[in-house]
Amino acid sequence: MFEENSFKDGGLSRLLVHDSPYFKILNFNFKAGQELPIHSHDIEGQLSIAVLEGSGEFLGENDTTIPAQPGDILISEISEPHGLRAETDMRVLVTIAPPI
Amino acid sequence: MFEENSFKDGGLSRLLVHDSPYFKILNFNFKAGQELPIHSHDIEGQLSIAVLEGSGEFLGENDTTIPAQPGDILISEISEPHGLRAETDMRVLVTIAPPI
């Protein structure tokens, strides 16, 4: 995955790792300063965001932030606002179940 | 997660990260030489094994091995034989959907 997905200037670089009826797995790479803006979808299910490399902040409702470092995982309802801001270059793994 | 789960002498050290109707997430830490023996469950669904740190081999049927390094992810049917052998100390993230 590290070889297949790089970093982009315009915004996060997205790689679809797996998609099945059970879950969807994506790798997002962020350059320092890039972000996945807070968003949500009115769909049942949950997602996990696992930090593989780099550090930043998970973003939540009402300007809430949670430190995000390698080994940290955010679990969120798909319908709950969530996002991520990279302070250094970051690689994260996103798993969505059931898949959107 | 890195602070909450360490390494054990007797075998892999297991941490339940999350369990919900949508997926189960576990962190397994292996000392060099430890393994998750090949196994399978006769249940519908899939699992992913993402390597966070260290290197080793994913194990499959008929002595098949696949190199496992940070950024590598194995996707397997739950009913398909799968396992892992650590060559160095390893931390991996396992996601099972639907949860067993």
Image (tube, coloured by chain):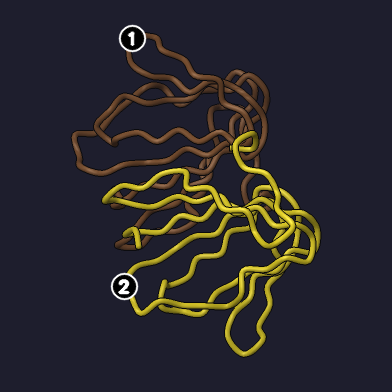
Chain colours: A yellow, B brown
Task: Give the letter of the chain under mark 2.
Answer: A
> Quick one: label 2, few (<14), some, or many (20+) residues within 10 Å?
few
- Which residue appears at 62% of the width and 69% of the height? A36
In percent of width and height, residue B73 lies at 50, 36
Q: How far apart are marks 1 and 2 (CA)?
A: 39 Å
The answer as to whether the residues below labels 1 and 2 share one chain is no
Q: Which residue lies furthest to the bottom in this view?
A: A62
In percent of width and height, residue A85 lies at 70, 69
The amino acid sitting under disc 2 is Glu
Is residue B42 found left or right of A80 in the rendered image?
Answer: left
In percent of width and height, residue A100 lies at 35, 63
Cβ–Cβ under 8 Å for marks 1 and 2: no
Say above or below: B66 vs B30: above
The amino acid sitting under disc 1 is Asn
In percent of width and height, residue B100 lies at 29, 47
Is residue A97 found left or right of A62 in the rendered image?
Answer: left
The quadrant the N terminus of chain A occupies is top right
Residue occupied by mark 1: B62
Please tell me in which quadrant of the rendered image residue B56 appears: top right
- Say which element carries label 2: loop
Residue occupied by mark 2: A44
A33 or B47, nearer to the observer: A33
A12 or B100, nearer to the observer: A12
A33 or A77, nearer to the observer: A33
> Quick one: label 1, few (<14), some, or many (20+) residues within 10 Å?
few
Q: Of the residues tagged 1 and 2, which is closer to the observer?
A: 2
